[in-house]
Image (tube, grey):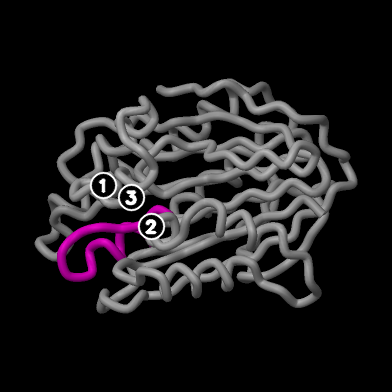
Amino acid sequence: MTRPKTTRTSTASRAAHLQWFGWTDIGRVRKNNEDAFLGLRFDAHDVHRLGRIGEASLTAHDYTFAVCDGMGGAKAGEYASEIAVEKITTLLPRASQNGRRRADDRFAGVLEELYAQVHRALVYLGRSYDECQGMQTTMSLCWFTPERMYFGHVGDTRIYHLQAATGEFRQLTADDTYVGWLFRNGQLTDYEARTHPRRNVLQKAMGGENQFVNPQVGSAMFERGDIFLLCSDGLSEGLFEHRILEVLRVRQPGFNPAQTLVEAAVKGDGRDNTTALVVRVA
């Protein structure tokens, strides 16, 4: 298991609100959308699927947001991402039955088990049905509690964090690709990584012929004004980070940053399905 260092800013207020915005697009090439995204409010007694746009207090419930990018023949990729979403809806509320106050390692254990169960379900279906053979999915997930945000990640979907206090904008997750490894180790420039012919070849995903899944898990403190972005690789390939940052900083009534990001990425590239979830600490 990969455990990155915790990102620390300042302790979040218990009265903090979350605002979220989601959007997805099939793109200009693909025939079906294998991306899926989820917003979920839950506690030990109740679970509720969220709409693509909303706002709510962190006082009484936990919130989870996730983006998945499925892969496989026919509609197997589409099924894979939806199965991952359904597993989140089922498993995370169960974890709340043990109480809201838990240590970091408790959250890490819950996320590791979640990823393992999604992986096992996809492997089983892939081996049992011809139409599901080879089905795989990536998944990046943010779990918001009043104290901090916990995240899990497998694949090349991404989670970014824009800190209001410092203006720092950084990627919390590490792409599970060889090209991503080369970039992180300074052997490729940003442009070289974005144009490399093997940039979309995954080293890790859930399902398929992979025997085990080793998710990246971590956590981040947050404060009012912080923004988190979850996105599929269609967005990160269609837009440079400076353009993403420009959109996230826009504050206008009725403005949907996720929709603006997705539409700009599809216009600039559009070869893949494109999905974005923007979560703002209001």
Label 2 with label 1: CB-CB less than 8 Å: yes
Separation of residues labelled 3 and 1 (CA atoms):
7 Å
Q: N-terminal of the two: label 3 or label 1?
A: 3
Q: Name which of mark 2 and mark 3 comes first in the sequence.
A: 3
Q: Mark 2 near mark 3, Cβ–Cβ under 8 Å? A: yes
In contact (CB < 8 Å): disc 3 and disc 1: yes
Question: Could you classify mark 2 by the number of other residues whose Cα lies within 10 Å: few (under 14), some (14-19), or many (20 or more)?
Answer: many
Mark drawn on residue 253: none
- Residue pictured at 62% horizontal, 24% vertical: 6
Q: Is residue 144 left or right of residue 230?
A: right
Q: Could you tell me the amino acid type at mark 1?
A: Arg
Q: Which of 31/268 is in front?
A: 268
Magenta stretch holds residue 79? yes
Relative image position of residue 99 (x, y in whole percent): 72, 33
Quadrant (top left/top right/bottom left/bottom right) for the C terminus: bottom right
Residue nearest the observer in this picture, 106 or 162:
162
Placement of the N terminus among the 4 image quadrants: top left
Question: Mark 3 sits on what residue?
Answer: 194
Q: Which residues are magenta?
A: 68-85
- Find numbered disc 1 in the image and state the secondary structure of the residue it sits on: loop
Q: Is residue 117 above or below residue 266?
A: above
Label 3 sits on a secondary structure element that is: helix
> Which residue is at a point 32% across and 66% down the rendered structure image?
272
Q: Which residue is mark 1?
A: 199
Check disc 2 and report its element: helix, strand or loop: helix
> Considering only vertical position in the picture, is 14 above or below 194?
above
Q: Quadrant of residue 168?
A: top right
- As drawn, is 184 to the left or to the right of 57? left
From the top left corner, tell me how far across and down residue 261 is, in percent: 54, 67
- Residue drawn at (17%, 70%) of the image: 74
